[in-house]
Amino acid sequence: MGKWERVKLGTIGNFKSGGTPIRSKSEYFEGNIPWITTISLGKTFINESDAVEYISAEAIENSSTKLIKENSIMVGIRVGVGKLSVNTVPMCTNQDIISIENINERQIYKPYIVQCIKSYQPYFESQKRGATIQGINSKILRSLDIPLPPLETQKKIAKNLDTAAELLAMYKQQLAELDNLIKSIFYDMFGDPDNNSYGWEVSLLKDIAEIVSGVTKGRKLKETNKITIPYMRVANVQDGHLNLADIKQIEVTDLEIKKYRLNKGDLLMTEGGDPDKLGRCAIWNGEVPLCIHQNHIFRVRLNQEQILPEYASCLIGSLYGKKYFFRAAKQTTGIATINSKQLHYFPMLIPDIKLQHKFKNFVTKIEEQKTLVKKAIDETQYLFDCLMSEYFE
C-alpha cells in the first residue's frame, strides 16, 4: 500500500461552503429546494427526505448558501465535525458544511473517499478551535493526505468497510430491540405507571430503600491508613446500563469503604447536571470486586423482600420516572439536579413480589442475549478499526 499514489483532498474537486438564509424572511423557507445542516449527515447517501427545511430560489439568490450539485461529498466542519454524506440530489447546506463537487469519477470512488475522510476523525478532534462552538476550517480538509489506489481497489476497500459498518449497525439495532423488549414486557406485566392501571400499592422510596450519597472528590484525608480503589462517577452511570470502559480511582479510608461500598443489586442514580443526566439509573451487579461511588451519584439499596432492582430500575427509567424527576428537579439554565429529599419521596408502585420475580427471569434471559450482542459489537468494531488502520494508516 505504500506504493499507492497520495494526493491532497483539496485537489480532487471544488470546495463550496454553505450559508443560512435570513430567518425573518418567511418566504425564503417556503420553497422546494432541500436545505440541510449537519443533523442530516451520517448516512453514506442522503436525498431530499433528509432535508431539515426546504428553501426557495430567492433564498439562494439573497444569501450565502449555494446549490450543491448531486453526488458531491458533504463534510461537517462545525456542530458535527467529520460527519459525512454524498447527496443524491441537488441541495443547499448551512455554513457548518463544506461540499466537494466535480470529483472525477473515472479516478475516484466517492464512498472510498468518505471512508478515508472518516479515518481522520481523531485528527479533526485535535484540530477543533472555537470558544463557544468548536470546528475546523476548510484548510484542514484541503490538506488531508489521501491514498489513491486504482479505482477497482477503492471500490473493494469501500465495500469491505461498508459491510463491516452495516454489520455493526445491525448489531446495535438488535441491542436496541432487546432493550425495547424489556420495556414492552414491563408495561405488559405491570401496566402504565402513569395511571397505575393495575392499582398497585404505592410507597415512598425512602420507606423501602436505604439512599446514600457518595464520597466527595478533593476532600482532605487526615488518616494515614488509606488505600486506592475504583469508584463510579456520573460518566459510568448511563440510562439503564453501566459504562465501565473508563473507571477512575480514588484514595479512601476504611471507614469510607464501609460507608460507600457497593453491593450486588444496588441501584446507582445520577443527581443530574445536563438534563440527560437527571435521574439516570443502572443496576450494580458486582462488576468490580471492591468499588464505591462519588457524591454526584446516589446509591439506592432496596428491601428486596418488597421490591427487586430489575423492576425498580425499569420503573425509575420509565417515562413515569423521568416526569417525576423533571418536575421535582431544581433547574437553572441548561442544568437540572435532584437532591436526596426529592429522591426519598419518589412514589414507587409495588407489584406482587412473585410477579416481580417472573419479570426478573425475563430480564435475566434478555440480558444474557444482550451480552452476546455486545460481544459481537466489540468484535465487529475491532474488525472495522483494524480495516481502517490497514487501509489508511
Image: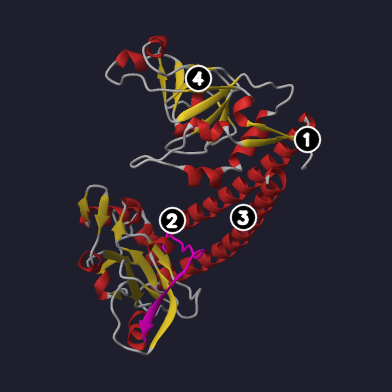
Where residue 96 sits in the image (x, y, percent)?
43, 31
- The residue type indicated by label 2 comes to Asp
Left or right placement of residue 100 versus residue 291 in this view: right
Q: Which of marks 2 and 3 is nearer the N terminus?
A: 2
Q: Do the residues labelled 2 and 1 touch (CB within 8 Å)?
A: no
Is 9 located above or below residue 276 in the figure? Answer: above
Q: Are marks 2 and 3 in contact (CB under 8 Å)?
A: no
Residue that label 3 marks: 377
- The residue type indicated by label 3 comes to Ile
Q: Do the residues labelled 3 and 1 touch (CB within 8 Å)?
A: no
Q: State the CA–CA distance, disc 2 to disc 3.
A: 29 Å
Residue 324 is at least partly visible in this image = no
Q: Give the range drawn in magenta.
A: 237-253
Is 247 located above or below residue 50 in the figure? Answer: below
Residue that label 1 marks: 153
Mark toward the viewer: 3 or 1: 1
Residue, far bottom: 225
Which image quarter is the N terminus in?
top right
Q: What element carries label 1?
A: helix
Where residue 171 sits in the image (x, y, percent)?
61, 51
Left or right placement of residue 7 versus residue 212 in this view: right
Mark toward the viewer: 3 or 4: 4
- Dividing the picture into quadrants, the one containing residue 134 is top left
Q: Is the magenta stretch mostly helix, strand or loop?
A: loop
Residue drawn where x is 33% and y is 41% of the image: 132
Near-viewer residue (309 or 110): 110
Label 2 Cα crowd, 10 Å radius (few <14 / some 14-19 / many 20+):
few
Q: Which of marks 3 and 1 is nearer the N terminus?
A: 1
Residue 240 is covered by the magenta coloring:
yes
